[in-house]
Image (cartoon, rainbow, N blue to C red):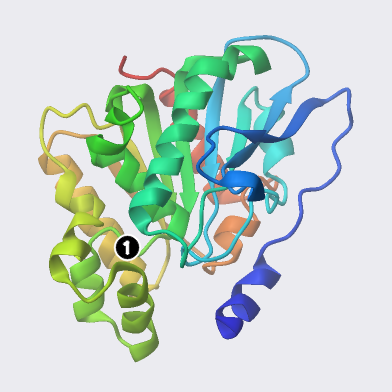
Amino acid sequence: MTSLAAILLPLLLAVPALADEEVRVEQDIAYSDAGGEGGSTRLDVYAPADGEDHPVVLWVHGGAWRIGDKAHLQRKPEAFTSRGYVLVSVNYRLLPGVTYREQAGDLAAAIRWIGEHAGDHGGSPDRIALIGHSAGAHLAALVATDHRYLEAEGLDLGALSGVVLLDGAGYDIPRQVREARVPRMKDLYEGVFTEDEETQRDASPITHIAEGKGIPPFLILHVAGRRDSQAQSEGLAARLVDAGVEAKVIPAQGKTHATINRELGIPGDEPTSVVFGFLGAHRSSGR
């Protein structure tokens, strides 16, 4: 995994300092005891200094399901809190110690924690959106389509007001494995989801989409010209629309897999404008 870390870690930049009068910050809050003493099931909260009932956004980092950290936020805390959102950034347990199932379960537990504690941080428990990048996009999409994860926490899909996905490519994993253009991509997905096609299907958000489940609206962004994330994004959106779920695909021009994440929140950034337009239109959940 040294080579993978060498590729991804430079893309993960620490959050900038924020003035106390602009935002309230509380870090390393345990939302579950599943992470043990190591604290892998912890989250950070960035909230506007004033007001209450703010919509909440749960940020899910990427890192090939194996690396990444909730602190790698770049401009996001400032961008979200200045627009009246409470931003929650979550750590989840990483491979190889767990599987995607435990990772999705961790996200569901974090959503349950938000529902119970959002008011303590000026947020609304009825206005929770998910945003994920790369592997985080896969996990966000899985939790928002496979009802079993939220049901295990006493919730349903109506707990979510919307889902934003940034350049994920794991929405239909058997297809991704079949169509992988280079061996290392096939190896990556089989290393996470095994070579068993039934397991791959279970891990695929597209498998769990059905009409009448209460699946929230989706905004799906992919890097323009990246073939696998484009195909995966369009396939996911088509299945959602067929099931009566609002879904829109946006190709991000001039972006890379790294910059679509790193530049989110920068003034003048086009994906940022699209994301906040979507969030503003879907501020309440389907409870």
Q: Return the x and y of residue 168 as percentages of the image width and height.
A: 40, 60
Residue 191 image offset from top left, x and y in percent: 36, 76
Q: Is residue 225 left or right of residue 236?
A: right
Which quadrant is the C terminus positioned in?
A: top left
Look at the picture and state if 174 lies above or below 117: below
Residue at the spot 15% in from the left edge and 69% down from the top edge = 197
Splitting the image into 4 quarters, where does residue 204 fall?
bottom left
> Residue 155: percent from the left, percent from the top?
32, 23
In front of the other: 240 or 210: 210
The residue singled out by tag 1 in the image is: 170
39 over 133 or under it: above or below: above
Nearer the observer, 191 or 273:
191
Badge 1 amino acid: Gly
**What residue is at 61 percent from the left and 76 percent from the top?**
5
Is disc 1 placed on a helix, strand or loop?
loop
Identify the image quadrant of residue 28.
top right
Camera sees residue 54:
no
Crowdedness near tag 1: few (<14), some (14–19) or many (≥20) residues, C-alpha within 10 Å: many
